[in-house]
Amino acid sequence: MIEIKNISKSFGEKKVLNNLTAKFDKGQINLIIGKSGSGKTMSIKCMLGLQNVDKGSIFFDGIDFTKIKEKERRNIRREIGVVFQGSALFDSMTIEDNVMFPLKMTSGMFSKDMRKRVDFCLERVDLHNVSKLYPSELSGGMQKRVAIARAIALNPKYLFCDEPNSGLDPTTSKVIDNLLKEITYEYNITTVINTHDMNSVLEIGDNIIFIQDGSKKWSGGRDDFLKSNNSELNEFIFSSATFSKLKSIM
Amino acid sequence: MDFLIAIGQYILFLKSVFFKLEKKRIYYSRIIDEINILGMSSIGFVAFISVFVGAVVTLQVAYNMENPLLPTYLIGLSSRDSLILEFSPTMISLVLAGKIGSHIASSIGTMRVTEQIDAMDVMGINSASYLVLPKVVATILINPFLIILSIALGLVGGWLAGDLTGICPTEDYLLGIQYQFIPFNLAYAIIKTIIFAFIITTVCAFFGYTTKGGALEVGQASTQGVVYTSILIIICNYLITNLMLG
Ligand SMILES: Nc1ncnc2c1ncn2[C@@H]1O[C@H](COP(=O)(O)OP(=O)(O)OP(=O)(O)O)[C@@H](O)[C@H]1O
Ligand SMILES: [Mg+2]
């Protein structure tokens, strides 16, 4: 379980996160939703320690990430898998080496076992015969799947995905959503996903946090999502064409 | 003020490059890779420049020594000394600053803006050390060889030019390049080269590593890296010369 308490982050005068508090449960898909620029990526970056918060605490299963030494931070990070907004595959390495990279760097496994694990992870995300290719030779959706394979290579306790299905067609998008759902339930991971894709919200959102201008405006499950009478959330939901149509027939 | 902050950041950057290392085994294979990428790929380029500049240096020396009282073997001697003392270690290092320096800054800069470095950091890996240390070690190992190669080929270029134009016959040239040879000069050249290799890799890597933004900024980081590297090489060249030969 991950908990963030009153985190704030500013760049100069600009407040990007403002007293954000939230809880992300284990074995569930936790979604952070909000408009572009609302602070979704920033909140994930703060949780990962890629940006320091100005104020507030971040707890990974009770350990305050903001107050521990670099070395202990590294130990927690080794239990985290991340899928970045742009996949962030290492473009000088083959797909196989990309997935093997965290194993090679941190695991102490034998190379035979690493190879097995890589094959398993690539199989798991439904990729075949790509291990010798380079990231630039794959499509965007395939790259996302490789990024997921790399993120789960070390059996993470926590999984972060920044817009896993942005820029993908609805079918591929659904494949990725299902994959994340399966992985989360199967391995009992605390999964945090950023998205502004409404379909994903309704498909996989166990616990949804809606943020705007860096503060939490609403949180709840997917069943309450469409029924909420929070005006900011409603504005966000029904700004998309499909959903405004939906509203008119509801 | 910004400048002082940048120097502070550079020192912290060096600290993370050289301390808190990852597993040793990983560095060995990375160093071999970098020797190939940064060193081997520069051989042809360095050889080409060295032969021609060696030829030009010889022709210029000959042109300045038209006094018949001066023995012709002096042409070989002064070409040798200018190649060893200045041309090969300094000029070739400046050329390499452009070639491998910009490569280092732009490849690391691209990794930064495409979040590849963040991806390493969140795996709990010391990205600065993993990416930069092998480059530093590789260039420190390989650049002295490039410089010795450059000196040798520069001498060959000088010999060809002297012989083909007839201004310095082979015999005199060979006598000249051996006459009163001071081995210390070679040591001076190699020490300079090693210091310059350190500057090229760490400064350009620093500019790449601290890139913010997108493709445009990667280009800027690469240019800035090469400019600052060149300035530092010129300043250090003066200081080292003052210290070792002054
Ligand atoms: N390094 C930075 N310096 C200054 N401002 C920043 C920086 N990074 C992000 N911001 C600002 O923080 C705000 C939130 O950005 P963030 O990337 O978290 O948005 P987001 O919700 O992920 O949007 P998107 O859906 O477009 O990815 C934006 O207004 C952005 O301009
Ligand atoms: Mg974002």
Image (cartoon, helix red, strand yellow):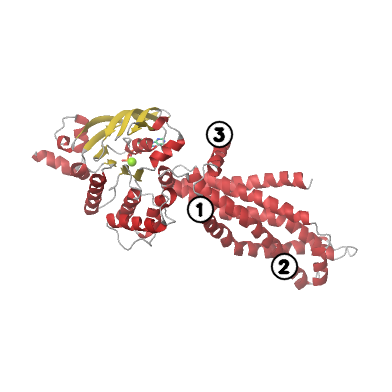
Q: Amino acid at mark 2?
A: Val
Q: Chain of mark 1?
A: B
Residue sticking out furthest to the left: A249
Q: Is residue A197 above or below residue A136?
A: above
Which residue is under mark 3?
A: B5
The lab-note entry on whether marks 3 and 2 share a chain reads yes
Cα gap from disc 3 to disc 1, whole angstroms: 34 Å
Graded by Cα atoms within 10 Å as few (under 14), some (14 to 19) or many (20 or more), the crowding at tag 2 reads some
Q: Amino acid at mark 3?
A: Ile
State the residue at coordinates (82%, 71%). Answer: B171
Task: Assess whether mark 1 and mark 3 are in contact (beta carbons under 8 angstroms).
Answer: no
Horizontally, is B52 left or right of A12 in the view?
right
SS state under label 2? helix
Which residue is under mark 1?
A: B25
State the residue at coordinates (65%, 59%). Answer: B145
Sequence-first tag of 1 and 2: 1
